[in-house]
């Protein structure tokens, strides 16, 4: 049953009415903070005329005095209690219906909002909260008094039909109210279908917002429906507006002699791409030639997307809004229309292409002797898959074998130097699905990173690092004042590092917290020592959790994880909007342009970081769905697994054979009464003392595979 139907009882209506009345009472005192009022005066200002309602107002005022919102200044007269009363921030809901206000002022503590005090606010909304008087030994509490801005107005969910209306039951776990859809706003949707609804209003007397269906997605459980639902849930598009497609189709792809004359012509230099087997957008290529002085020249060539996508165009506007391509298990939702991403800008073999390039002269040790940045025209001679390039590296024979062999050697030197400087190396395995022709999972496999992957990685890192240094650093080594887009990664939180160090010590590993260099070195040593051990996955997972999140910004603080003082994203403009910004800024400064407007670019950076986070969450959700789809045929089977997460309501187990993860609810571990030991990532049996800890090996049976919830329920055997 929907959440709505529970609320339609007389008890629910009475509770909703009382809540609304309390909000009105609060509103009177909020508007008249200096007036001492009795209940009759308050009733006249609401207004309330019914005798029962007047008595209710009297009771509410007495309750508000007990809560600390009001104080009784004389018999029957109340005044709003003076405090630093109002805090603005964003709401983060829990599944219980309560919420926490995360204040915009980072110096403020989070404020707890009980379910009765959230009003009509929704998860993520920007709100003004009245701070209630703090009770002894209690967290700060508050009440939402004004919604300053909605985080979102559109929600995906399942339709539940009534006689002349429907409710959309949202998929999002933190959207705790259903949306009422009047009959004339249903758009022909049928009971049980997935759809997207837009909230149109929320009457004060209603327990649910009113909405309209804006898109019908399809039947629940079908792969396309669920993938589109995932995108919609995170507010991500799954098709381009027709006008964007039309504009892309009309782009002139001719490379004229006049355009070539403006660029460095590198078409005669041997050039190739190395990409995954199923790649369609090739946004980077490498060129290689030996120089008469014994050095080598390596060109890192990146699709010149900004030549085709111009500011003010609809394509530009759409790319800016999307900010990134989204990679779900069975599809890519590109940032740019396919005609650009897979054709015009893609560095396909045997075609002349316009690029933005970073060209390096390197000695045999991989040290840079000279560098050049600018626009080029190239011609890719060969397209390698990672497997084909790996075979060339291992056998020393095949197309471009000499070039690839030498570049592999340079890449390994670059990598060694990076690790010497303290770059953190995570070896956490990445699980992939083998799909059939219909996009359904046949099997799982672990993606390996071999020398061919690392070759590409090191030269892309080199280009990103040197472009950032070229703009961000003056000739004397001091930071420049030029506005630029950096990819930064802050130092880990010291408290998290301390906690991590204490935990791994129990397994015989040590993290030296003396200084930045010792932390990096000892962390790398721990990650190397743990390889092949039972606890490897657990310790790598915890190490990743200690790290800050990398973001885009105009304020450079360096990249901790890569151990670079300057770093940016220059190498993937087909799939990342920040790279397009970097290309434009780089050309602007090469043309001796004035310093760009910092505030504008910082806003773009924040948006890009936020969209990257959403895309990552959508990708994880699609993996979860595909895992459940794959395991649906394996309900009842028993698998070896490793505890990958521990919470107060259960333990997560990753199955060793297929890397799928499911939940064992605490209530299902029935050989004892277990309690959650947060400090040790464990649950402990109260009577037996049995401990189930992060990283422990267990046998589990697949109990249920729920596609709609994207949830695997397991049971410990």
Image: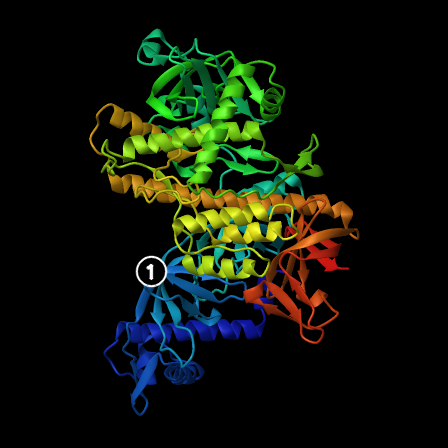
The residue drawn where x is 48% and y is 56% is: 210
Which of the pair 683/711 is nearer the observer? 683
The residue drawn where x is 40% and y is 21% is: 363
Q: Which residue is mark 1?
A: 106
Q: Quadrant of the N terminus?
A: bottom right
Mark 1, other Cα within 10 Å: few <14 / some 14–19 / many ≥20: few
Q: Quadrant of the C terminus?
A: bottom right
Farthest bottom residue in view: 75
The residue drawn where x is 39% and y is 66% is: 110
Where is residue 18 shown, x and y percent of the image? 46, 75
Residue 235 in view: no
Left or right: 285 as drawn, with respect to 4? left
Residue 205 in view: yes
The image quadrant of residue 34 is: bottom left
Q: Secondary structure at mark 1?
A: loop
Where is residue 90 shown, x and y percent of the image? 39, 59
Which of the pair 215/268 is nearer the observer? 268
| Number of numbered labels in the structure image | 1
Where is residue 64 shown, x and y percent of the image? 38, 81
Farthest left residue in view: 594
The image quadrant of residue 693 is: bottom right
Left or right: 148 as drawn, with respect to 628? left
Q: Identify the coloring.
A: rainbow
Where is residue 252 shown, x and y percent of the image? 40, 15
Does 358 sit above or below residue 694?
above
């Amino acid at each position: 049953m929907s959440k709505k139907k529970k609320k339609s009882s007389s008890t629910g209506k009475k509770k909703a009415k009382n809540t609304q009345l309390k909000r009105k009472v609060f509103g009177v005192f909020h508007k008249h903070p200096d007036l001492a009022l009795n209940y009759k005066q308050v009733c006249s200002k609401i207004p309330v005329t019914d005798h029962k309602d007047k008595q209710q107002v009297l009771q509410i005022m007495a309750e508000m005095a007990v809560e600390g919102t009001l104080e009784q200044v004389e018999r029957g007269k109340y005044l709003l209690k003076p405090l630093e009363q109002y805090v603005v921030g964003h709401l983060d809901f829990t599944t219980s219906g309560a919420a926490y206000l995360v204040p915009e002022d980072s110096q403020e503590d989070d404020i707890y909002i009980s379910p009765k005090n959230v009003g009509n606010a929704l998860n993520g909304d920007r709100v003004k909260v009245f701070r209630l008087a703090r009770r002894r030994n209690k967290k700060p509490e508050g009440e939402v008094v004004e919604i300053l801005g909605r985080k979102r107005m559109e929600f995906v969910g399942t339709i539940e039909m009534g006689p002349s209306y429907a409710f959309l039951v949202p998929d999002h776990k933190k959207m705790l109210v259903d949306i009422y859809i009047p009959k004339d706003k249903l758009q022909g949707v049928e009971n049980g279908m997935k759809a997207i609804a837009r909230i149109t209003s929320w009457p004060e007397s209603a327990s649910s917002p009113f909405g309209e269906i804006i898109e019908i997605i399809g039947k629940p459980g079908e792969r396309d429906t669920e993938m589109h639902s995932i995108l919609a849930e995170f507010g991500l598009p799954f098709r381009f507006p027709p006008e964007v497609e039309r504009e892309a189709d009309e782009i002139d792809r001719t490379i004229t002699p006049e355009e070539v004359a403006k660029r460095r012509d590198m078409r005669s230099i041997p050039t190739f791409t190395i990409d995954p087997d199923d790649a369609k957008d090739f946004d980077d290529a490498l060129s290689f030639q030996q120089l008469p002085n014994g050095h080598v020249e390596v060109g890192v060539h990146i699709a010149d997307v900004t030549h085709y996508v111009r500011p003010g165009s609809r394509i530009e506007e759409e790319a800016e809004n999307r900010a990134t391509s989204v990679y779900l298990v069975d599809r890519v939702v590109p940032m740019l229309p396919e005609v650009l991403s897979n054709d015009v800008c893609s560095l396909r073999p045997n075609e002349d292409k316009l690029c933005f390039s970073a060209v390096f002269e390197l000695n045999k040790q991989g040290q840079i002797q000279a560098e050049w940045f600018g626009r080029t025209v190239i011609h890719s001679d060969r397209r390698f898959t990672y497997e084909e390039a790996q075979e060339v590296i291992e056998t020393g024979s095949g197309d471009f074998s000499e070039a690839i062999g030498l570049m592999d050697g340079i890449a390994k030197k670059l990598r060694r130097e990076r690790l010497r400087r303290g770059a953190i190396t995570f070896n956490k395995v990445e699980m992939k699905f083998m799909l059939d022709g219909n996009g359904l999972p046949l099997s799982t496999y672990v993606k390996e990173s071999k020398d061919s992957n690392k070759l590409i990685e090191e030269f892309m890192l080199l280009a990103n690092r040197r472009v950032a240094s070229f703009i961000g650093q003056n000739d004397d080594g001091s930071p420049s004042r030029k506005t630029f887009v950096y990819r930064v990664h802050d130092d880990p939180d010291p408290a998290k590092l301390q906690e991590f160090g204490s935990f791994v010590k129990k397994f015989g590993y040590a993290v030296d917290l003396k200084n930045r260099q010792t932390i990096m070195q000892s962390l790398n040593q721990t990650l190397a020592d743990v390889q092949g051990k039972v606890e490897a996955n657990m310790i790598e997972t915890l190490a990743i959790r200690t790290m800050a999140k990398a973001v885009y910004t105009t304020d450079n603080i360096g990249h901790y994880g890569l151990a670079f003082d300057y770093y940016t994203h220059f190498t993937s403009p087909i799939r990342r909007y920040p790279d397009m910004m970097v290309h434009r800024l780089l050309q602007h400064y090469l043309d001796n342009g004035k310093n760009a407007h910092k505030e504008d670019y910082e806003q773009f950076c924040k948006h890009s970081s936020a969209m990257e986070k959403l895309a990552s969450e959508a990708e994880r959700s699609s993996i979860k769905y595909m895992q459940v789809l794959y395991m649906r045929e394996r309900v009842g089977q028993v698998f070896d697994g490793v505890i990958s997460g521990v919470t107060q309501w259960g333990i997560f187990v990753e199955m060793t054979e297929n890397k799928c993860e499911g939940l064992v609810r605490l209530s299902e571990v029935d050989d004892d009464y277990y309690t959650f030991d947060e400090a040790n990532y464990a649950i402990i049996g109260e009577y037996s003392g049995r401990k189930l800890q992060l990283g422990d090996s267990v046998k589990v049976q697949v109990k249920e595979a729920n596609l709609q919830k994207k949830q695997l329920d397991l049971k410990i055997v």
